[in-house]
Image (tube, rainbow, N blue to C red):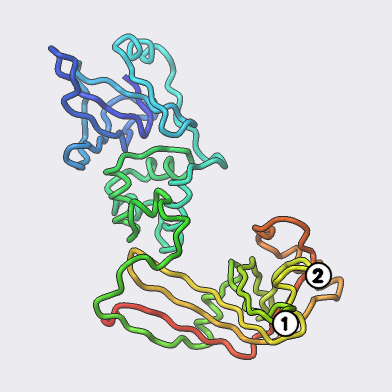
Amino acid sequence: MRAHLGDRLVVENPATGVARRDGEIVGLHHEDGTPPYDVRWSDTDEVTLMFPGPDAHIRHVEHGQPGATRTSSRTDIGEAEARPAVAPPTGTADPGDIGRRVALERRRRGLSREETARRAHISPGYLAYLEEQPADPTVATLLSLAAALGTTATALRGAGVDLPPGQGHALLHPQLRDLGPEECRRLLSTHGVGRIAVSTPDGRPAVVPVNYEVVDDAIAFRTAPDSVPAAAVGTEVAFEVDHLDDAMSQGWSVLAVGPANVVTEPDAVRGLARRAHTEPWAGGAREMWVSIRPTRLTGRRITPADQ
């Protein structure tokens, strides 16, 4: 019997062939995929070391096809014994959506794979597999990962991505505090997505999200000359970034106010293009760089009162 991380171990009644118990294989002890296995049982959510008997078989996940499985018959297992085991691919550039969200949340919280795996009661190897492959973990594993990362299984699955952030309940005892300039600069980081508030040529206010870079304390973004963000040029504008943690009902925001100007010096334009972390998400031809030099930088953070 051989298995990959993410496969399911099914224990059947020898007389009826009905599954009595099943679980997700979250840990391997041998590189060739032979027993024993660490199994997270679907009925108890506990992880135990399992030496499969004759009443057990492996339900293989078709790696690379999220959610697809095939059930191994006794003959399948016999054939698998005769074939060399193929380890699940790792390190590819095609993780599934769940894996991307898990990896992003883990890095956001400054956790290593080892620490996250320990908190979620899974092996670091299985966590690496989840982050790097289009895997389909069980609900139990997803709940454990969500608890380890301080978020929700719903968020890791991507539900609610079309809803505005901040759907959670307010903290029982919230604390709202002002942020100093240095912390504001740190939260701005080097790049991200922020919102610029401008007055359009017809005199109407508008707030538009843009991909931005921070270079030498200036906030720079790329746009097109006839776009709404281009209306910022030659005016004083407000630029805002924030982060909301729905699971913890807390977050922060930073507001920068200052004059916006077109970057025209060729070397400066080439330098911005070279240092840009990403192309504008909106796509299209956006070759005009606009720079905002903040004259005022303020921010606020909401946390529990006891923090």
For label 2, the SS is helix
In the rendered image of this protein, does residue 40 appear above or below residue 259? above
User: Where residue 67 sits in the image (x, y, percent)?
Assistant: 41, 33
For label 1, the SS is strand
Q: Identify the residue at horizontal 41%, vertical 73% (top origin).
A: 251
Mark seen at residue 269: 2
User: Where residue 165 sits in the image (x, y, percent)?
Assistant: 43, 65
Residue type, label 1: Ala
Q: Is residue 250 left or right of residue 38?
A: right
Q: Earlier in the sequence, mark 1 or mark 2?
A: 1
Name the residue carrying label 1.
Answer: 260
Relative depth, front residue between 198 and 42: 198
User: Where residue 65 sits in the image (x, y, percent)?
Assistant: 47, 31
Report the label total: 2
In the rendered image of this protein, does residue 222 appear above or below residue 88? below
Relative depth, front residue between 151 and 232: 232
Q: Quadrant of the C terminus?
A: bottom left
Residue type, label 2: Val
Q: Identify the residue at horizontal 35%, vertical 26% (top origin).
A: 3
Residue depth check, mark 1 versus mark 2: number of the one nearer the observer: 1
In the rendered image of this protein, does residue 137 appear above or below residue 228? above
Q: Identify the residue at horizontal 37%, vertical 33% (top origin).
A: 5
